Amino acid sequence: MKERQREYEVVYLLRPDVTDEQVSSIRERLENAIDDAGGHQLKFEDWGARDLAYEIRDESSGRQFEQARYQYLRYLAPAEGSKVAEDELKFIEETLKYLTVKLDDDLIPDERLAEPIEQSQGERIPYES
C-alpha cells in the first residue's frame, strides 16, 4: 500500500523591500524542506506587493509595514510533515506572516500528481486594488 499524504496551501507575506533574489532563495528553501519531508510541490505563485488592511510590525527589525509581498505555495506532504513550510518560514527573517490550510486528506501522491493542479480548487476571485 502506498503512503498517503495531505494537500496544503500556505500564503506567506514577505517584507515589501525583499529583492527577487531573496524571493528565489526563500522559495528554494521551502521547496527543499518539502522535498526533505517526502512531499511534492504542486504550485507556486508570486502575487506581488499589496497593501495590508493594517500595519504589521516586523519582529526582527521593529519596523512597521503597510505593504507586503504575497506568496502562494501548494504542496503535498505526509501527515507528520504538515507544518514543514511553517517550520521553515518562522526562521526566515523576511517573513512577516504566514497561514497554512489543509485542503485534502488521505491522498495517494501519484494519483494527485497526475491530476490538473486546479482541479480541486474552487472559483478564484481576482484581486482588485
Image: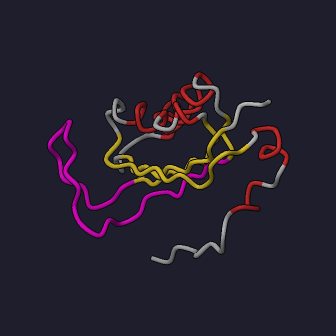
Picture quadrant where residue 79 is located: top right
Q: Which residues are drawn in magenta?
A: 43-68
Q: Magenta stretch containing residue 49, yes or no?
A: yes
Q: Main secondary structure of the magenta part?
A: strand
> How is the model colour-coded?
secondary structure
Q: How many marks?
A: 0
Instruction: Please give left or right for residue 114 compared with residue 108 in the image.
Output: right
Image position, residue 117 (x, y; %): 75, 54
Image position, residue 124 (x, y; %): 62, 72
Residue at x-position 62% and y-position 49%? 105
Image position, residue 12 (x, y; %): 43, 49
Relative depth, front residue between 13 and 22: 13
Instruction: Please give left or right for residue 8 compared with residue 93 in the image.
Output: right
Residue at x-position 41% and y-position 51%? 99
Q: Residue furthest front?
A: 1
Image position, residue 96 (x, y; %): 31, 47
Residue at x-position 59% and y-position 22%? 36
Q: Magenta stretch containing residue 50, yes or no?
A: yes
Instruction: Please give left or right for residue 3 compared with residue 35 in the image.
Output: right
Picture quadrant where residue 86 is located: top left
Relative depth, front residue between 90 and 96: 90
Picture quadrant where residue 106 is located: top right
